[in-house]
């Protein structure tokens, strides 16, 4: 149950060799080239490019271009500097900034807000992964049995092979080891002696790598909704996610007891959940509106009780399923095409095992602590990484950081994707960080949490961390 990530790499043989490169920090500035030439590119943005090696382990390798974009500070004469932002994913950033730029209006009082599509994504030498074979039933990421898992694993492996072939010179370089050096090249190209950085969600993984390799080049750094890239035991990494998800199901039940408009108001919500799951486990529940049936694993796959705004719909879905109609659980979610390039980088940084017996043993262990829904987090990572071909990886490890300036860290108490224990672990290893516990969910600053935003603005503009013991309540 306590296999380490390093141990799993050796056991399953599906994640390739760990990067063991010793590129000196100064090489990033030398290998990156030129300064950014900004041109207007619509929606109030200015765009440019930075040339970097396709592989920082071989600084003289073929060059690729990273696309960058900025929202200029409103008063250029009075601005305090440049703030590099990564909104998470891992995914493209520029197209997201175009539609989310209002979230940065406050920050443009003081900074040029800059984003970059990570290497291989969209405008940064974008990799077009072929989609020759559809992923089996991508509405369901919790696998009902080994046969379903192995079928999925085979197809996901082919996706990874095709994607690697499409990557050209970027093959094997999609990980935060490389991205940290890209970030430093962007810093240098913008003429900044220090990097001011705001990382949200997966952007915090890039931040951990940058802090390890370039601590003396950090000015100010704010990490929001932290993904822990320091824990080597997969069960230890999964357990906080499972417990947070389980608690969120309990919060949903409490809300329903107090909310007359809840479709299950006046009923024992957790008992209804247990009955629906038990019934769907014995025999899938009919979904006449979609002409199909719905299994228990489909219901679990379609349920994330972290999002308060979705509780009314979840209550309706459970009430109807309990009455014999699971149509609402059968409907496919609205979203982008899946799989996409994101899982290649994600699994390069988090090389998850592919062995079904290993994963099933972890599920069994998590069911002891989180019997209703938390155990399902075992399969979320497997859905991304199962069967992907070997590649160079940059797996989780304890941070080795010296000389880091003060760092501000925050995560939401109700966030099962990036649970608060992740933030606490990372903050403790950064050595000079202040963690602000917050009652909230994912992406606290972007979601407009007023307390968090106030602390972030003060820190980024003055360098002052909140007093020790500071916490933020509900928004």
Image (tube, grey):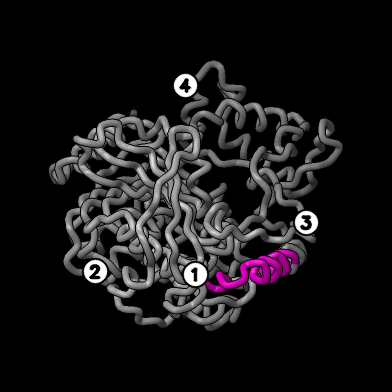
Q: Callout 4 environment at 10 Å: few (<14), some (14 to 19), or many (20+)? A: few
Report the residue marked by disc 3: 134
Report the residue marked by disc 2: 401
Camera-side mark, 3 or 4:
3
Report the residue marked by disc 1: 63
Give the distance between the C-alpha atoms of the residues marked 1 and 2, in whole angstroms: 29 Å
> Which quarter of the rendered picture does the C terminus lie within?
top left
Q: Give whichever of discs 4 and 1 has the lower sequence position.
A: 1
Q: x and y percent of residue 202 in the render? A: 44, 54
Give 232 or 146, whichever is nearer the viewer.
Answer: 232
Report the residue marked by disc 4: 258
Q: Give whichever of discs 3 and 1 has the lower sequence position.
A: 1
Camera-side mark, 2 or 4:
2
Secondary structure under tag 1 reads strand
Q: Is residue 47 above or below residue 452?
A: below
Residue extent of the magenta highlight: 155-173
């Amino acid at each position: 149950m306590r296999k380490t990530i390093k141990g799993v790499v050796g056991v399953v043989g599906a994640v390739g060799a760990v990067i063991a490169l010793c590129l000196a920090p100064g090489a990033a500035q030398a290998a990156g080239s030129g300064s950014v030439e900004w041109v207007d590119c619509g929606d109030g943005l200015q765009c440019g490019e930075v040339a970097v090696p396709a592989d920082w382990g071989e600084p003289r390798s073929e060059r690729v271009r990273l696309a960058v974009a900025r929202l200029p500070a409103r008063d250029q004469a009075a601005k305090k500097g440049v703030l590099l932002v990564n909104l998470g994913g891992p995914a493209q950033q520029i197209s997201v900034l175009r539609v989310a730029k209002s979230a940065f209006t406050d920050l443009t009082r003081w900074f040029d807000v800059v984003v970059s599509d990570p290497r291989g994504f969209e405008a940064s030498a974008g990799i077009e992964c072929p989609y020759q074979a559809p992923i089996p039933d991508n509405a369901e990421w919790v696998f009902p049995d080994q046969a379903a898992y192995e079928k999925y694993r085979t197809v996901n492996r082919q996706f990874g092979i095709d994607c690697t072939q499409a990557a050209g010179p970027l093959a094997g370089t999609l990980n935060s080891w490389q991205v940290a050096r890209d970030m430093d090249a962007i810093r240098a190209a913008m003429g900044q002696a220090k990097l001011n950085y705001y990382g949200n969600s997966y952007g915090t993984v890039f931040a951990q790598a940058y802090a390890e390799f370039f601590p003396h080049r950090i000015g100010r750094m704010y990490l929001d909704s932290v993904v822990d890239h320091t824990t080597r035991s997969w069960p230890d990494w999964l357990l906080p996610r499972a417990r947070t998800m389980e608690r969120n199901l309990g919060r949903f039940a409490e809300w329903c007891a107090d909310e007359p408009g809840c479709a299950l108001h006046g009923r024992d919500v957790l008992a209804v959940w247990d009955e629906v799951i038990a019934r769907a486990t014995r025999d899938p529940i009919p979904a006449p509106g979609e002409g199909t049936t719905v299994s228990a694993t489909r219901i679990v796959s379609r349920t994330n009780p972290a999002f308060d705004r979705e509780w009314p719909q979840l209550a309706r879905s459970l009430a109807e399923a309990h009455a014999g109609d699971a149509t609402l659980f059968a409907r496919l979610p609205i979203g982008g095409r899946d799989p996409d390039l994101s899982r290649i980088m994600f699994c390069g940084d988090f090389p998850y095992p592919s062995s079904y017996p290993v994963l099933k043993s972890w599920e069994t262990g998590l069911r002891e602590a989180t019997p209703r829904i938390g155990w399902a987090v075992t399969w979320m990572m497997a859905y991304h990484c199962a069967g992907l071909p070997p590649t160079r990886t940059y797996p989780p490890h304890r941070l080795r950081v010296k000389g880091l300036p003060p760092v501000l860290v925050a995560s939401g108490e109700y966030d099962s994707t990036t649970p608060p224990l992740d933030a606490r672990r990372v903050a403790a290893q950064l050595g000079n960080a202040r963690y602000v516990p917050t009652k909230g969910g994912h992406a606290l600053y972007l979601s407009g949490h007023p307390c968090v935003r106030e602390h972030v603005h003060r820190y980024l503009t003055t360098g002052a961390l909140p007093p020790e013991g500071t916490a933020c309540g509900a928004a």
